[in-house]
Image: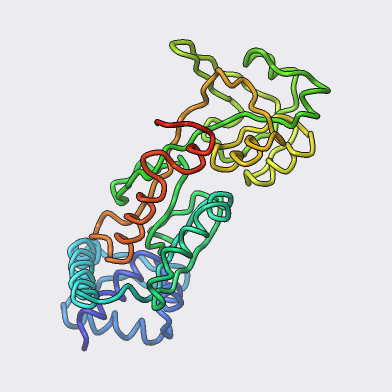
Amino acid sequence: MDQLRAMEIFVEVARLRSFSGAARKLGMTRAMVSKHVLQLEDRLGARLLHRSTREVSLTDAGQAYLEPCSAAVLQAQEAARVVTHAGAELAGPLRIQAPSSFGSEWLADSLARFCLPHPQLQPLLHVDDALLDPIEHGFDLTIRVGGIPDSSALAIRPLAPCRGVLCASPAYLAKFGQPKAPEDLHAHRCLHFSHLTGGTAWHFRRGAEETTIRVKAAFTANNGLVLQHAALRGLGIVYSTSFLAWRELLDGSLVQVLPEWELPLNHLSALYPASRRPSPKVRALIDFLLAEYSPVPPWDRALGIRQA
């Protein structure tokens, strides 16, 4: 019996609470997964899992074994990665998740240029505005704009500041007027990004002065680019970001609203599992993105912003 392989399979079954789910994840048959776990139980002389037609659960012995088993598997995987990648060219799959708008507007181009010198690298970029669990979904690297989870299971590397900006089309402002204070937003059509952590409570700061306005959303979407298109058509005032709106702000097709008031400063961050050192290709990509976006990202430099 390959004990390490059996341990890897047991960890996956315990994590998913399913033999079938582990089989799909590992590209094996359910029967083979079950065989490996049974062999591991025979070797240990203990039953690790309760089986039923509905679910799989850990026995007391399984619960006690899971943590040291997981640690041993991770250590072995890391040792194999060190040997495999020592002095080698970056190669193989690299699973990345990013928000839709940032992924299409910036990361896709950065990732393509990162991969050019490494033709054996196989990036798999998943763009999605949902706050997916990086570990559960098997991502090597997750890029987040705000929305940082409070989890000791993830390591976080800040990449760049991410500025919120309110803007609207000249046609909308000519018709409805330019707001003079945050309270004026109550009388305006507001375009709302549904993943904002504060919901429709928009926060503003000007020096020591702070205020929060709960807007009535005239249009809501879970994608920033969708909202920006609506703003360009004159539908209302959009809560956007400088990385998305910079070009339109420069050419005048969008105009900043309440420019003297600051919206909360988020950060563009890279997340990866804290339980192991990042692989050479993950480290290399993080270093590349830091060089691209830090200390002042190119979209802010274009707008004349020089510091965080």
Q: Residue at x 62, y 22 (%)?
A: 214
Residue 148, position as x, y percentages in the image: 41, 42
In the rendered view, would you say 52 is above or below 32? above
Residue 241, position as x, y percentages in the image: 56, 37
In the rendered view, would you say 224 is above or below 112? above
The C terminus lies in which quarter of the figure?
top left
Q: Residue at x 30, y 50 (%)?
A: 155
Left/right placement of residue 21 relative to residue 235 reads: left
| Front-lying residue, 6 or 244 | 244
Residue 160, position as x, y percentages in the image: 40, 41
Q: Quadrant of residue 116?
A: bottom left
In the rendered view, would you say 90 is above or below 194? below
Left/right placement of residue 87 relative to residue 101 reads: left
Left/right placement of residue 73 relative to residue 291 reads: left
The N terminus lies in which quarter of the figure?
bottom left
| Front-lying residue, 110 or 192 | 110
State the residue lying farthest toward the bottom.
1
In this rendering, the count of numbered labels is 0
Q: Residue at x 67, y 33 (%)?
A: 238
